[in-house]
Amino acid sequence: MSSDAQRVVPTRKLIEVALPLEKINEASAREKSIRHGHPSTLHLWWSRKPLATARAVLFAQLVDDPSSHPDRFPTEEAVAAERRRLHELIEQLVLWENSNNEDLLQRAHQEILDSTDGNPPPILDPFAGGGSIPLEAQRLGLEAHASDLNPVAVLINKALIEIPPKFAGRKPVFPGAADEQISTWPRATGLAEDVRRYGQRMRDEAEKRIGHLYPKAKLDDGTEATVIAWIWARIVACPNPACGIAMPLTSKWWLGKKKGKEAYVVPSVVDGKVRYEIGRDPALAPAKETDGTVNRQGATCIGCGTPVEFKYIRAEGQAGRMGAQLMATVAEGKRTRIYLAPTPEHEAAAEVPRPGHAPAGDLPAEALGFRVQAYGMTAYSDLFTARQLTALTTFSDLVGEARERVLADAIASGMPEENRLEQGGTDAAAYADAVATYLSLGLSKIANINNSLNAWQPSMNKAGHLFTGQAIPMIWDYCETPPLATHAGSLTTSLHGITTSLDKSPASTLGFASCVDAKSVQYGSHTLSTDPPYYDNIGYSDLSDFFYVWLRSSLRPVHPRLFGTMLVPKSDELVANPYRHDGKEGAHRFFEEGFREVFRNARKLVNVDLPYTVYYAFKQQNAKEGGEASTGWESLLEGMIRAGWSITATWPVRSERVTRLHSQGTNSLASSIVLSLRPRPDTAPSIDRRGFLAVLKDELPSKLKELQQGAIAPVDLPQAAIGPGMAVFSRYSGVLNDDGSKMTVRAALARINEILDEVLAEQEGDFDSETRFSLAWFRQHGFDAGAFGDADNLARARNASIEHLDRSGILTSRAGKVTLLSPIALAKIYADKTYDPSADELISEWEVVMHLTRALAADGIRGAGALLAAVPDHIDRDLCKELAFLLFAIAEDRKTSQVAQEFNALGTAWNDIVTEAKNGPGQLAMEM
């Protein structure tokens, strides 16, 4: 980087100043319940970032904060008003319903153009994973670049951002499909229709070949019903020589727990064999201690009661002597599930030879989250029953046949054949490759359900799927679903998720996805936003081999460079994997050095006008010192700072809605931290420890006020405040301790948190005397009673009096005891009488906050807003907001969870309450 570039004073972006964080978090949490058309239904990926978060971060990363333009916004009021306008745009932008709102997206794109001189940079994510960031860059009208070392991730990104724009606006080529719709085919809807049509043809052809493997269930009335699942238990021979039965290994006997429709398996031993019936009487249902035969200690034989150690079960599995026995069949009824005892016909239907061309590939000897190898499952094909392998290999063969049919139909429709998709083609051959890609993703998706590690879920009356977490655990009872039906696990259902997602794809600007190691990426003029691997949380490469072997079997001719290896490349994967790097120390060193190299390379050709953004998934169980430090967190910060980056902001983003506090009295930590980075000049000076602390004390107060002006919850403030603190720490080439050594990130975080506490405490000097007394008393006693003498001394020191405070309604002073009135106590007092703040001559900031907390709990934002509108003008609204934040921090320190929750709710909703207050007091406040 040139010295001229280093001297540039960059324009501050929204991401570096303030975000409407709680609205972003709410929208992100809501995405968890959205499936129809969501990109997550295209294919599973672990720890996929919410689209709402990615969209908001990208927008805020590129759009100027109004404080950077004093010529246009000369006063604090003008800056706050403009920031509020941009925040309101973000709040609309993050809503799922607005994902394809062209007018709104165009407004957002125009804001980006205005802040980038009409030339927005291409966005690059070198750890693209599930593709949320590149997809949202494309949705905002930006050129999107995704790269990843993992071929499965690259394929997902191709399907999300690279393929749809190539064929946007085209009609489907399936014979007759285009004639059935008179209107145009916007975005990639024509491509989606072809995937739908050829997928249905593929399913119908599969039924001709393997339909006989999935018989219907015969009901008691002689009719037939479609099977939803067959439920199996693994079996081993009982080690007791006097018994020796094929003992079932199951974690549960329950089949369905819906009230009034309970069902469970009733086992019995007849002539040395285990038989199963279906029980329905809730009074006779298995209790928790008798549910199943396997627990954490081992198994129990149902024939003789012999306890069986896992050591024996593992040995049987490794010797190839572990089998399976059908326990129950689940059939489709009229808006219900019908549970049936097993029959010889249905057991025989599953007895098919294993196909000779099942995908090759061995499970790793050791891997993060893998538990099945100890039971004799050593190859990926071992994770499937013979019938499942037969179905999946049939579908794999049919992907290639479907591609040939698409090619012929595309040529017949008038497309020239031209180049293949991997060669950059956009005509018939490339189009056939594209359809085959989505069909193969459909096959890969159903493998997640059609395997022998998928459990039946009695509480939900449905099949689950393997990857409920980021592991391949051992399970004992599993369900087998028919892939030709229309339920979970079927090709039809799988492709429906893909095509609805494809229908809603932006398919606008060009997107590019490449298979490249992050350390080798060429950055050019790109701006980076990325969600890198999280230390040792997830072993992506080992996990994704499960899908890779199926995708390779059907797509190797289509994407030969992606699927040229037997399994996913692993040696360069940037994960702290102790199995791969000589233990924990070697893994830590590999991870930290790898990150340093990635961010050192990124800095060489950095766009100095814009910050980079990086996500870090906070691993709560590793947190130290109140949640601000963990091994992975420190490694990430150290790697970035040593690579020459300065951290300008840290934002906690959550994909889980926090509605109540944990029982131990603390709010949930953020599920991710978003960091904003700027390059540190090569000429940056060092500073001693005392100077560093002085700069922190000088800068943190104003930065804290900026944060509090944004829509940020009090629970998120400490983590967000680390950003300005780390901005100071990382702007220097080093902070030197008294002995000349460099201060570590961990030590810097501790100092930042100490000064944050001091800044919050210093804010108390701005409050009125009544509030200052109440804060001091609250720290000591909360809302419990304390001695009058102590309270009187404390009040006099703050130029207040207990008598005055009693009359004002802040506290009660009775029988030598003083008690602050909590919002709950105020609610009881004003249950049948009116509180009018405009007529309260003794009103204080404390009293306003207590009543607002009460009103918010009882009447929501509308009620709190009406009350705030009636508060006299001499009460400073900003100080009331600061008080809510401070009270939350004190309540958390006191471990009073309910109280902390109330003040967190008020701080979180403050901006909405202020907006509501503009409507005036109305009648609501007068009636409270």
Image (tube, rainbow, N blue to C red):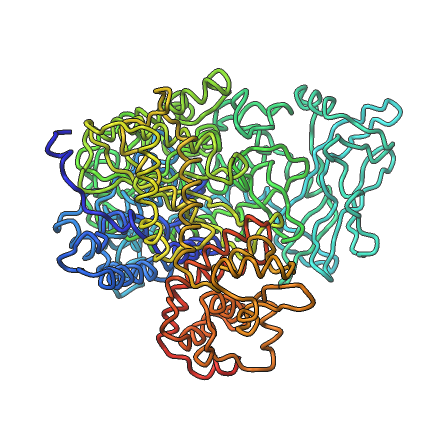
Residue 606 vertical position relative to residue 698 in the rendered view, above or below: above
- Asked if 254 appears above or below 377 in the picture, the reply is below
Place of residue 426 in the rendered image (x, y in percent of width and height, measured from the top left) = 21, 42
Q: Residue furthest left?
A: 4
The answer to which of 414 and 540 lies nearer the viewer is: 540
Residue 282 placement (x, y as % from top left): 79, 56
| Residue 647 place in picture, x, y as percent | 31, 37
- Determine whether, in the image, residue 846 is placed left or right of residue 124: right
Q: Who is closer to the viewer here, 172 or 889? A: 889
Residue 702 versus residue 258: which sits nearer the camera? 702
Q: Residue furthest right?
A: 242
Q: Residue at x 38, y 66 (%)?
A: 877
Work out whether residue 560 can be spotted: no
Taking the spot 58% from the left edge, 53% from the top edge, the residue there is 780
Q: Quadrant of the N terminus?
A: top left
Residue 401, percent across and down?
A: 38, 39
Report whether 4 appears left or right of 459.
Answer: left
The mark tally for this picture is 0
Q: Is residue 656 left or right of residue 163?
A: right
Q: Which residue is pictured at 69% across the width and 30% down the height? A: 323
Q: Is residue 775 above or below residue 475?
A: below
Q: Is residue 367 left or right of residue 118?
A: right
Q: Is residue 746 visible?
A: yes
In front: 608, or 299?
608
